Amino acid sequence: MIKIMSDAMKSVRIAAMEELIGTEIKVLDKGFVRLIDYMGDDAAIVQAARVSYGAGTKTVNEDAGLINYLMRHRHTSPFEMCEIKLHVKMPIFIARQWLRHRTANVNELSGRYSVINNESYLPEIEELCVQSKGNKQGRDVQIAEERAKQIQQYMQDHANETFEQYDNMINNDNLARELSRITLPQSTYTEMYWKIDLHNLLHFISLRNKPNAQKEIRDFADVIAEQIVKIWVPHSYNAFMNYKMNAVTFSGVEMAELSQLLDKEKISAFIEANSKAKGELREMCEKLQAMLNKQ
Amino acid sequence: MIKIMSDAMKSVRIAAMEELIGTEIKVLDKGFVRLIDYMGDDAAIVQAARVSYGAGTKTVNEDAGLINYLMRHRHTSPFEMCEIKLHVKMPIFIARQWLRHRTANVNELSGRYSVINNESYLPEIEELCVQSKGNKQGRDVQIAEERAKQIQQYMQDHANETFEQYDNMINNDNLARELSRITLPQSTYTEMYWKIDLHNLLHFISLRNKPNAQKEIRDFADVIAEQIVKIWVPHSYNAFMNYKMNAVTFSGVEMAELSQLLDKEKISAFIEANSKAKGELREMCEKLQAMLNKQ
Amino acid sequence: MIKIMSDAMKSVRIAAMEELIGTEIKVLDKGFVRLIDYMGDDAAIVQAARVSYGAGTKTVNEDAGLINYLMRHRHTSPFEMCEIKLHVKMPIFIARQWLRHRTANVNELSGRYSVINNESYLPEIEELCVQSKGNKQGRDVQIAEERAKQIQQYMQDHANETFEQYDNMINNDNLARELSRITLPQSTYTEMYWKIDLHNLLHFISLRNKPNAQKEIRDFADVIAEQIVKIWVPHSYNAFMNYKMNAVTFSGVEMAELSQLLDKEKISAFIEANSKAKGELREMCEKLQAMLNKQ
Amino acid sequence: MIKIMSDAMKSVRIAAMEELIGTEIKVLDKGFVRLIDYMGDDAAIVQAARVSYGAGTKTVNEDAGLINYLMRHRHTSPFEMCEIKLHVKMPIFIARQWLRHRTANVNELSGRYSVINNESYLPEIEELCVQSKGNKQGRDVQIAEERAKQIQQYMQDHANETFEQYDNMINNDNLARELSRITLPQSTYTEMYWKIDLHNLLHFISLRNKPNAQKEIRDFADVIAEQIVKIWVPHSYNAFMNYKMNAVTFSGVEMAELSQLLDKEKISAFIEANSKAKGELREMCEKLQAMLNKQ
């Protein structure tokens, strides 16, 4: 990671992030994510963690190792020491899911102050899918293409006609903006400045980039994770992927079942081979030993 | 305030609140506020405050007086010791303002799980007002009644037609609910369980029951204040009205101006008459004396 | 669970919780946890969840099943619909760990308003343990009993002498309370009213009742979990134990390792035997299948 | 305000803040406030506010004017768009007041991980004051100097002896750090990284830099306000001073009293002279008119 430094400046800026600032990363048909500003980097997380640990941490002295340790053991507060500010444009039905995350700062476009532009989300044909049966909140396979095209056309026409009447009420009738906008569809685009700390951003990604989140917000979460967080705090990103996104949790009941499905010899061999391991590998051996004990 | 007590029960319930539980208090054309549950009362605020003050508070021993003192001096934490849970039904454009208050617990109807009913807010004729000039986010006088009726009719027809297509997509095409709903207007009714502590509820009321809030959310805030809070915690309600809602704040610059507009003699007389006052009256004299000193 | 109902009352109270109200459950040598009030029960969680799910949830209709589902899939907001208020007395060094949980309401005894009683935490002999090497923040085996007794005696004498001087400064010198108290040890007992929703309470327990938390706060967390939460919301308590406290998480890297340690035949048999399972068992099969695929 | 810009950098840094980074600003005898990082400036507040206002704000187009407007009308969210990170060292009894502000991110030195240095707050002779009678939580005049010196000496000796025993338990007995530290006085210095947004920082200052806050935390709040915030966001600082710190609020009851104490003629003249005023002056006239109407 290349950092920008200058004589007049004591704070450190990340070159790749500076380059990203201001660029609209397109999401959906008319939305975007745009980096506005950021505070801190992987080193800032380590720096704050070391205040807590003080003289007691001489052995956990590699930065990436410490970040892994913090992520693994749910020491979340150091990740709150980084902050990011994004300008995001998304449909209102997505904004409503987004703003359920309360630990963030928000300034959203107001339909009371401003005249709203005729911009609404029009799903691609391949997104027009039937209701999922397994996932009560999701979608399944595409509906027949012929009909999908009609539906898409309807959505487009409906939005255009609704905005036409909106403009009419705003301009010809001078009807208050706060009333004229109530007919606009939930697919109408809105935008906001959104500022959040890294811990809560990762939590957002973990909830909104998982299969049962709505596809449209997954697209945003994915862009933020892969095109911003990964560049901003690469060590934390890796730790997050390994310990959160790709991790699998078994309940107490499931652990008892799983214990019966292990190859006892292989496990004993694994534990023996790693009997003097430290850190993560030792923790793995402890989990395995506990499973052996249940057999 | 009548309290319900029984041998099997150590907690105290307020008779008038028990009666209110479950009743839909109508707001707007199809919305409501419905009390679900509550924790604490005026006495609970005092009880918690006395933990902080301990032996040090022998002289502030009247409950209403202590509540006034706490409200006046921004000792907000005791008011957080009361909690209320409401079931609220409101249009989506109001829900979006509502949920900007982050310090609350929310379970809202999900358009991904559920089929949405054809219920949308239809403003009364007299609510269809022109854009305000002074208040960029508000409305002013009514528009011509003839045209208002047409607009109201349009809003009704527009909602009906949109919901007809929604039902069609849901039932005939089996289009996923999370997609079908994106065309529905922002006037569509939603509902939620909303749980909040008294301090944050009063803050909500102070922001949403003021003239520059949108009329439709003012209606909700007003119902909550006058028909629920007033019954639940009458002392706190009174203190809130006097020290927050009916209070007037003058900036530093305005105070300098105001100091020039006072009747010096009357003020000196007032201060002298109350020279031995305690508590609130003493504080008033101090404010007046500071103004005299600026003349 | 026996519920108390009466004609004058629409809210439901839990008999066992009513009995508990006001009782000091002793923790450590002089501390306690005392139930003050509560809002909601397991049914209130289900009730709020059903607002979100609406008509879409006909198949998930058993309450315990729904609570399990919510806990398993991190649908945390319905658990925020229950609230509890406790009166807790604990040493200051524990209060400082406690108050790092920010999503709670607090009224703590103030050393500025009140004269502090001579009450400080004196560890039992068997608690006086040497510094742990593995756990940089924990303790290991007991130190020699002879020396432990001396240390305990020192701690007692030190507290008594410090409080004697404190009383002296307060009573003889009339030194301001806010200054006199600065010499008092961190073992000094404080007390607070603490109000928190169930979701955040469970999070508190999951962090403070785990092996690397300080033994003294574990004692409090354990009492709250076993003697209060378990009585209050038994279904949620069970779900929490199974899906959180007794659950084991394997990182992405660990899952790859674990995949090599399974008995392939047993797993295939397990999956086949449960090929038509629903809900949790289906999810277990999916996890196992993913592991098989990695072999 | 001089801003640092470079070709490789799109974000803007404030020269005076860069200079400040890393410098310990001394507070009390051994404490400090040290700027670590910051995000945003006055312009960032305006930038975020304009997202909300969009096309609707052509007339409120001066930045300082907009900041004044936002502060005056409690539009707090744009002020949340700035963030600051400080390294602060303060006595534990102050840290405990500090951390009651929950909307902040914190990493504090842990007495479980680290050996604590022998550093405790020793009040100056002139700070050793008698208990205030009017302000139950405050101090009044100095106690007799002779005795003050004795008390100061006692505090010093007490801290030294306590730390000597602490070192003894840590080094000779290898008693766990988490136990050894419980005897240390509340005057012991701790340190933390503390990150907070500007809105909540101003709220912190407004509560902690007022006369009834403890003198020692006022010192910190004052340094943060005068030596950091004033440099960082000068327009916001001015608005905060005028509309919050130097503002005076009169309750509903007080306003009725005050209305009787005005010079009616002067007020009428003031209103007439400013009859065509806009913005703030118009608002002042409205407040005065309301008072006239009460006479």
Image: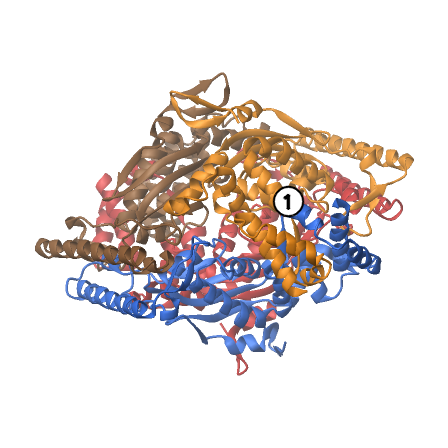
Chain colours: A red, B orange, C brown, D blue
Q: Is residue C247 above or below residue D129?
A: above
- Helix, strand or loop at label 1? It is helix
* Quadrant in the picture for the C terminus of chain A: top left
Residue B233: name its quadrant. Answer: top right
Residue A185: name its quadrant. Answer: top right
Which chain is home to disc 1? D
Q: Which residue ends up furthest to the bottom in the rendered image? A: A7
Q: Amino acid at mark 1?
A: Val
The residue that appears at 87% across and 33% down in the rendered structure is B149
Query: Mark 1 Cα within 10 Å, few/some/many (few <14, many 20+)?
Result: few
The residue that appears at 42% across and 60% down in the rendered structure is D139
Q: Nearer the viewer, residue A210 or A98?
A: A98
Q: Nearer the viewer, residue B75 or C174?
A: C174
Does residue A43 appear left or right of residue B272 in this picture? left
Residue beneath label 1, please? D253
Q: Position of residue C37 (x, y in %)?
A: 42, 33
Q: Is residue A172 visible?
A: yes
Residue D31: name its quadrant. Answer: bottom left
Q: Position of residue B254 (x, y in %)?
A: 69, 60
